[in-house]
Amino acid sequence: MPDFKQQLLDRLHNRTATIGVIGMGYVGLPLAVEFARVGYHVIGLDVLPEKVDRLNAGDSYIPDVPSETLAPLVESGHLRGTTSYDDLTDVDVISICVPTPLRKTKDPDMSFIITAADAVASVCHPGLLVVLESTTYPGTTDEVILPRLVKNDLTVGEDVFVAFSPERVDPGNPVYGVHNTPKVVGGVTPACVEVVTALYEPAVEQVVPVSSTAAAEMVKLLENTFRAVNIGLVNEMAIMCKRLGVDVWEVINAASTKPFGFMPFYPGPGLGGHCIPIDPLYLSWKLRALNYTARFIDLASEINTSMPYYVIDLITEALNGDSKALNGSNVGILGMAYKRDIDDVRESPALDIHELLEDKGASVSFSDPYVPSVRLSGGRTGRSVALTADWLAEQDCVVIITDHSEFDYDFILEHAPVVVDTRNATAGRDGRARVVGL
Ligand code: SAJ
């Protein structure tokens, strides 16, 4: 019986291993590049031909991966793209980096993982290591991935090796990337931990083994639930401070002077992005199946999803100050992205606020230098307008939803009649506009 573990370790140590990465998105492409940079031969698989074509042309579509980095790896043959699982037949490792969104019912959408797992099962062979990187509920690797791989009479830990390693890619982060972000790994067996550690060690500064795949899955959920719950807490603090007539931003900044035992989070118009609003709900969904209610997650989600409605109340309050009704007013939104200085609108609260304003009869437009257009309700396309003095003056109320660095806040305060500032972006500035804060 061949020693498949040693054969794989040898291939990893001498970089003759070939690695398949499924999902060439903001997680998979940076990972594929990092593997290729340390000498592995990598095949990046994606279902979108246009991504594969651009990858094979050395033309990056992920801002965190410069084409100057990608192109030489493609030219040297260390990285190539494909849309066919046939090309993964002989690889030594397969890393699954596919999306894990929510369905409309707020339940996990496991379809991407299941499709990938079934495809991997079709090319599974003795000596293969399969690593799931997609954020998911504890138990996914053991319950969804593993059964599909061992059905061919393969024994996990001897013939096939299975692990989970949460992706920790923070798009746009100028400091942390794949190489210098510690990589948590959990294997089905100790041999699985040994080979998955050998896989990442050349590419990542620090590998952090944990005792099981479920522990590794839970690590990522703790990280992002921590953020969602603390953002929910500070959003509720903002609501309470408003009732008390206290400036929540002053309170947070002063609390932040505590050199220990405190970590600042900031209130905002709601919780956007494809991680923080979604990942905790994978955990609460799993626990419901175990007859447990994850109350902190549910409460944080309730508060965070209520923030767009709270912003509508602030806009209504601001218009009332000028004896105007929301119905029939012009409202200008500054920023549609889910957080500053990026172009991503997934789950952005700005989309909810835009729709709520229109539902109440306001005439809504937006300006976002990173977001030229967005899909609005009813399949319409909304287009960003230029941030001009005329546009600002035409508004009955301007609302800052995303505090992009390139906005000229002095200019905004000079030309808008009233500003609802959900990000404290105008702090310390004066201008003609009346400002209503969160
Ligand atoms: N937000 C607040 N108040 C805060 C922080 C964030 O309202 O104090 C809002 C943001 O405006 C945004 C949402 O929450 O709408 C999410 O913001 P985020 O800063 O958590 O950024 P994300 O969604 O890009 O989260 C990613 C995550 N990375 C991974 O999952 C690998 C998260 O774990 C990182 O901690 C986060 O980036 C980061 O720190 O930048």
Image (spheres, helix red, strand yellow):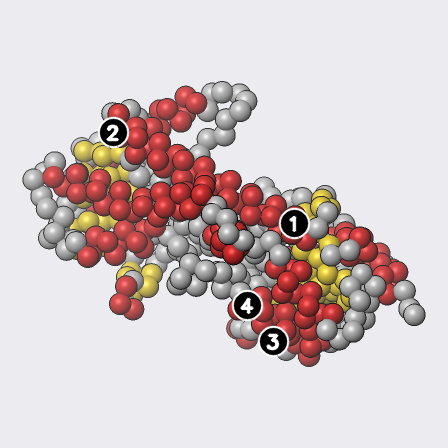
Q: CA distance from mark 2 to mark 3?
A: 56 Å
Answer whether residue 21 is visible to the viewer in this image. Answer: no
Amino acid carrying mark 1 in the image: Ala
Discs 2, 4 touching: Cβ within 8 Å = no
* Element under disc 2: helix
Left or right, 28 with respect to 225, comes to: right
Amino acid carrying mark 3 in the image: Thr
Q: Which mark is residue 216?
A: 1
Which residue is label 4 attached to?
Answer: 112
* Element under disc 4: helix
Identify the image quadrant of the N terminus: bottom right
Which residue is label 2 attached to?
Answer: 243
Q: Measured from the top left, where is residue 150 in percent x and y?
A: 74, 70
> Which class describes the residues within 10 Å of circle 2: few (<14), some (14-19), or many (20+)?
few
* Element under disc 1: helix
Q: CA distance from mark 2 to mark 1?
A: 41 Å
Q: CA distance from mark 1 to mark 4?
A: 20 Å
> Which class describes the residues within 10 Å of circle 4: few (<14), some (14-19), or many (20+)?
some
Q: Earlier in the sequence, mark 2 or mark 3?
A: 3
Task: Give the mark toward the camera: 1 or 3.
Answer: 1
Vertical placement of 86 versus 321: above or below? Answer: below
Left or right, 233 with respect to 64, comes to: left
Identity of the residue drawn at 21% across and 42% down = 313
